[in-house]
Amino acid sequence: MAGIVVVFDFDKTIIEVDSDNWVVDELGFTDLFNRLLPTMPWNSLMDTMMTEMHKRGITINDIVKVLNRIPIHPRVILAIKSAYAAGCELRIVSDANRLFIETILNNLGLRDYFKEINTNPGYVDAEGRLRILPYHDFTKCSHGCSNLCPPNMCKGAIIERILSEEEKKRVIYLGDGTGDYCPSLRLRAGDHVMPRKNFPLWDLICKNPKLITAKIHEWTDGEELELILLHLVNGGVDMKPIIVGSPLLSVDCSKFVTVVPLASHEQLPPPALPVHHLKPITYQC
């Protein structure tokens, strides 16, 4: 259905794990990461970890190989393809980094389904070292948000920009983490938020669901994500919100959802979308 923007977080929403932790753990740098974690912001720590990996002979190809085996629920892949086939505009807002996200999406054949990716810059420098920079340069000024956002990114500000660009479209936001709370607060009455149950975003919403203007639909795994998302996408605008803390609403998926089979859809790849390399939002310092 046209007229819908679906905005995904990435880590623990599209993929099953945190991509930063996955790379650090799989390449054997967990102890160093844990020692440095109390000393600097997460985004700065990941850039430092990439420098340490480079010093110890880890190449970008080693990192790519690890990213290409990251776990993802197969029904999430189907949900993305089916939402796209139904005419939805898909976007990502993530505190991971561009190189990790695009490597994973390209490996899964999903990159062209997304109109834009809002995330921290990640690139390989002239020495072959991966650099990870902040979306918002907090060393120059603060983004000014007090809704539990990390210093390098206010997802709420990004959602505000998307809402202003797409005033006539409904937004469905899917996320799991603390950083997804601020954008959830900014959604409108006609929008939907899908927090992953028993994750930080869900816990925060549970404390006071009345602060959320959008309808709330909790999910636990890729199968439920697909069922709920595609029900909303395929005309389920009158779907009763799944109240946080109540049993998951049971919906007969076959009545509402036309899932695009993986094999047949792969034969008809989506038209290439323009790649939006977005500049970070400028804040008044």
Image (cartoon, helix red, strand yellow):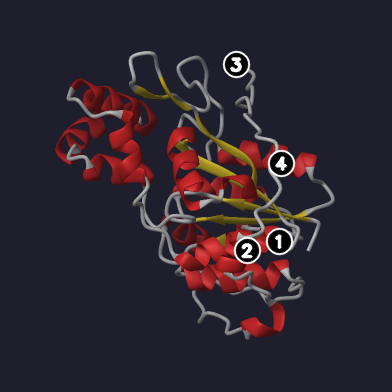
Task: From the viewer's perspective, tell me whether residue 44 is left or right of residue 224.
Answer: left
Circle on res. 255: none
User: Mark 2 and mark 1: span between their CA atoms?
Assistant: 9 Å
3 vs 2, front mark = 2
The residue pinned by badge 1 equals 85
Q: Quadrant of residue 226?
A: bottom right
Residue that sits furthest to the front in the current view: 267
User: Mark 4 and mark 1: span between their CA atoms?
Assistant: 21 Å
User: Mark 3 and mark 2: span between their CA atoms?
Assistant: 47 Å
Q: Quadrant of the C terminus?
A: top right
User: Mark 1 and mark 3: span between their CA atoms?
Assistant: 42 Å
Residue 239, image x, y percentages: 71, 76
Circle on res. 162: 4
Residue positioned 80% across, 56% down in the render: 3
Q: Amino acid at mark 1?
A: Ala
2 vs 4, front mark = 2
Circle on res. 285: 3
Residue 6, image x, y percentages: 66, 54
Q: Amino acid at mark 2?
A: His
User: Mark 2 and mark 4: span between their CA atoms?
Assistant: 28 Å
Q: Earlier in the sequence, mark 4 or mark 1?
A: 1
Task: From the viewer's perspective, tell me whether residue 285 is left or right of residue 151.
Answer: right
Task: From the viewer's perspective, tell me whether residue 166 is left or right of residue 214.
Answer: right
1 vs 3, front mark = 1
The residue pinned by badge 2 equals 265
Q: Quadrant of residue 225?
A: bottom right
179 vs 219: above or below? above
Q: CB under 8 Å between callouts 2 and 1? A: yes
Q: Earlier in the sequence, mark 3 or mark 4?
A: 4
Q: Earlier in the sequence, mark 3 or mark 2?
A: 2
